[in-house]
Image: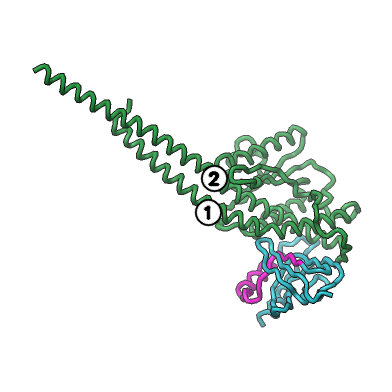
Chain colours: A cyan, B green
């Protein structure tokens, strides 16, 4: 079995990274999951969280929100609406993201208000992880 | 016959115009490069997104539980036209072409007895359509303050659209924008985004693989469709941005050339007039000398 696989992190505006990875830890909507080479094909949506890429060149972490991950035996493609290298996630950026999520909760349609509240909670948790 | 001084002023003013159009052309060329780059950079996301959604739509689409964004409201009575144009003029037929396509479509729909609503993005389209279709306007998105188009701009437009859709304000939404073919060719096109339509994607998500879905196919699709709307709008905005700069570049190139031609013509006229004046003067002097 191959030792590494292709990993791509793509945001709507640009391709954030494209590297070889040994394992990728993804904050899936149903819980964290780790993809390694040879993982069965899976598509999952993301919740706000930290995406960790372990590759031969070291470990990189990204804060991602919204979007989905496509996992195949050959590689992982993550499409995130927002993706930031951990270093770029400053308290100011995070506060803005939380504020946005809060606004979404107040404005949300009754049917999706739970989902929006969950996003907000995840978003806040993300902050305590990254910044704490 | 204009006087020499008039001609000289005229030449001066045309030269100034040429300087301005030349500068605009160069600015447009620089902006075009940047616009093309961002359009290029956005492509992988849009492509993957569409591929995955198309795959999901194919498997979920037929069932009764299909989300309304995919299946539609079951009617096409109320049509929303989202007309995306530039904020500025002086870019050849760019804005006019998009407005024309939208106007033709609106008139067709009206003739079929449908209800038309128009949402304009960009000032020029609103101005062009206001006279004959102004009563159908339901909103306008102003991007004139936006320095660099970002995904957030597309998101806010998408959010507005989705809120209106949820409120039952329309059944079908179509966006009008210009596809960037090359610097000299921009093609105005109409694309239906709600309910979502997928062209058969060639290659697409590896169709030989059977994916597991987490949470479920329906849930993922329901999550992705609104994002798909934003992605489609973002892609359209970027294409439009590149088209606008391309159109402006070629329009300004033409203007610069025309100004050059005009200067040549005026210069010839100026020289002829000057020579005629000198000749007349000489004739008068000689005639005067002979008379003595």
Residue nearest the viewer, comparing A128 with B220: B220
- Residue A81 % position (x, y): 70, 64
The residue lying at 54 percent from left, 53 percent from top is B31
Toward which corner of the image does residue B56 lie, by quadrant?
A: bottom right
Magenta segment range? A77-101
Toward which corner of the image does residue A84 lie, by quadrant?
A: bottom right
Kind of element beneath mark 2: helix
Residue nearest the viewer, comparing A61 with B224: A61
| Pointer 2 or 1: first along the chain | 1
- Quadrant showing the N terminus of chain B: top left
The residue lying at 76 percent from left, 37 percent from top is B114
Q: Which residue is mark 1?
A: B30
Could you tell me which chain the residue with mark 1 belongs to? B
The residue lying at 79 percent from left, 41 percent from top is B77
Q: Which label number is shown at residue B248?
A: 2
Toward which corner of the image does residue B260 lie, by quadrant?
A: top left
């Amino acid at each position: 079995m191959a030792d590494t696989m292709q990993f791509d992190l793509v945001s709507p505006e640009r391709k954030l990274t494209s590297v070889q990875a040994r394992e990728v830890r993804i904050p899936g909507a149903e819980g964290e999951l780790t993809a390694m080479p040879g993982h069965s094909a899976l598509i999952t949506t993301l919740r706000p969280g930290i995406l960790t890429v372990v590759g031969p060149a070291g470990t990189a972490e990204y804060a991602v929100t919204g979007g989905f991950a496509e996992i195949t035996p050959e590689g992982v493609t993550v499409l995130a609406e927002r993706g930031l290298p951990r270093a770029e996630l400053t308290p100011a950026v995070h506060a803005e993201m939380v504020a946005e999520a809060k606004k979404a909760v107040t404005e949300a349609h009754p049917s999706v208000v739970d989902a929006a509240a969950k996003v907000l909670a995840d978003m806040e948790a993300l902050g305590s992880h990254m910044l704490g | 016959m204009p006087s020499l001084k008039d001609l000289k002023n005229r030449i001066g003013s045309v030269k100034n115009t040429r300087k301005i159009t030349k500068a605009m052309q160069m600015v447009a060329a620089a902006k075009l490069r940047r616009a093309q780059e961002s359009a290029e950079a956005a492509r992988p996301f849009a492509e993957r997104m569409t591929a995955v959604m198309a795959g999901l739509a194919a498997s979920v689409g037929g069932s009764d539980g299909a989300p309304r964004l995919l299946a539609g409201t079951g009617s096409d009575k109320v049509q929303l036209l989202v007309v995306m144009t530039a904020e500025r003029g002086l870019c050849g037929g760019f804005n006019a072409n998009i407005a024309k396509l939208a106007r033709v479509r609106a008139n067709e729909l009206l003739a079929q007895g449908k209800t038309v609503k128009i949402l304009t993005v960009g000032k020029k389209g609103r101005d062009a359509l206001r006279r004959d279709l102004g009563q159908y306007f339901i909103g306008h998105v102003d991007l004139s303050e936006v320095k660099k188009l970002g995904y957030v701009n597309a998101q806010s437009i998408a959010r507005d659209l989705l809120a209106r859709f949820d409120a039952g304000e329309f059944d079908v939404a179509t966006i009008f924008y210009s596809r960037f073919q090359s610097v000299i060719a921009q093609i105005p096109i109409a694309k239906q985004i709600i309910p979502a339509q997928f062209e058969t994607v060639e290659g697409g998500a590896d169709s030989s693989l059977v994916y597991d879905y987490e949470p479920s196919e329906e849930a993922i699709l329901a999550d992705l469709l609104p994002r798909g709307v934003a992605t489609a709008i973002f892609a359209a905005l970027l294409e439009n941005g590149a088209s606008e700069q391309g159109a402006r570049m070629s329009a300004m190139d033409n203007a610069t050339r025309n100004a050059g031609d005009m200067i040549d013509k005026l210069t010839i006229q100026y020289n002829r007039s000057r020579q005629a004046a000198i000749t007349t003067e000489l004739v008068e002097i000689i005639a005067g000398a002979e008379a003595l």
